[in-house]
Amino acid sequence: MRQQMILGSFIFGLSRNFAYHNIVHTSDGGWVELDIVTGKPKSSQTGQKAQTMKITGTSMYAVAMERLDELRTLQEQRKPVPLVDGIGRNWGLWRINTVTETQSVIIDDGTAMVVGWAIDLSEFIHA
């Protein structure tokens, strides 16, 4: 079975009708600028921050709602989970910060025909 990415026990991909279409991966170099009254700001290194990742997609029907419930169950465990992409690269441990869903085209039984969703992750750094 092909997958785009695995977050803990959760699989993203077309085979589960829950594929993402966008990832925004952010890393911070730890640089800040200190304002100086009489000149240009001074660059200072404060240490690298944790990486973040926002995964977004659009899925259909009740399947999307079920998959988001699975992600929330994983989030409720309040533990960092491994993130591995579809080519086998291990990204380490990540926290599930937020799971957001936007339901639209809702039919009479409350099922959303279209569900836009976003998962916000932060790299888990342990001492």
Image: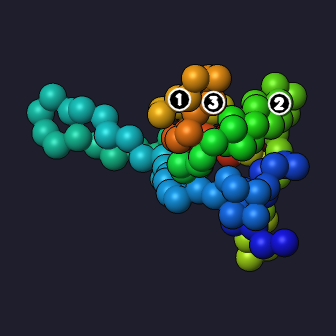
As measured in the structure, the alpha-carbon distance from the residue carrying label 3 to the one carrying label 2 is: 20 Å
Quarter-of-image position of residue 3: bottom right
Report the mark closest to the observer, 1 or 2. Answer: 1
Q: Residue at x 21, y 33 (%)?
A: 36
Position of the N terminus by quadrant: bottom right
Compared across the picture, whether 79 is left or right of 69 comes to: right
Dot 3 or dot 1: first in sequence order is 1
* x and y percentages locating residue 34 in the rendered image: 31, 35
* x and y percentages locating residue 25 in the rendered image: 53, 55
Report the mark closest to the observer, 3 or 2. Answer: 3
Q: Which residue is mark 2?
A: 73
Secondary structure of the residue carrying tag 2 is: helix
Quarter-of-image position of residue 73: top right
Dot 3 or dot 2: first in sequence order is 2
Secondary structure of the residue carrying tag 3 is: loop
| Amino acid type assigned to the residue bearing label 3 in the image | Thr
Q: Which residue is mark 3?
A: 111
Instruction: Farthest residue to the front: give it.
Output: 108
| Amino acid type assigned to the residue bearing label 2 in the image | Thr
- Tags 3 and 1 in contact by the CB under 8 Å rule? yes
Q: Residue at x 54, y 50 (%)?
A: 57
User: Disc number at residue 74?
Assistant: none
- Given residues 126 and 76, the one toward you in this image is 76
Seen in the picture, residue 104 relative to 45 is either above or below; the reply is above
As measured in the structure, the alpha-carbon distance from the residue carrying label 3 to the one carrying label 1 is: 5 Å
Secondary structure of the residue carrying tag 1 is: strand
User: Disc number at residue 106?
Assistant: 1
- Given residues 56 and 93, the one toward you in this image is 56
Compared across the picture, whether 31 is left or right of 42 comes to: right
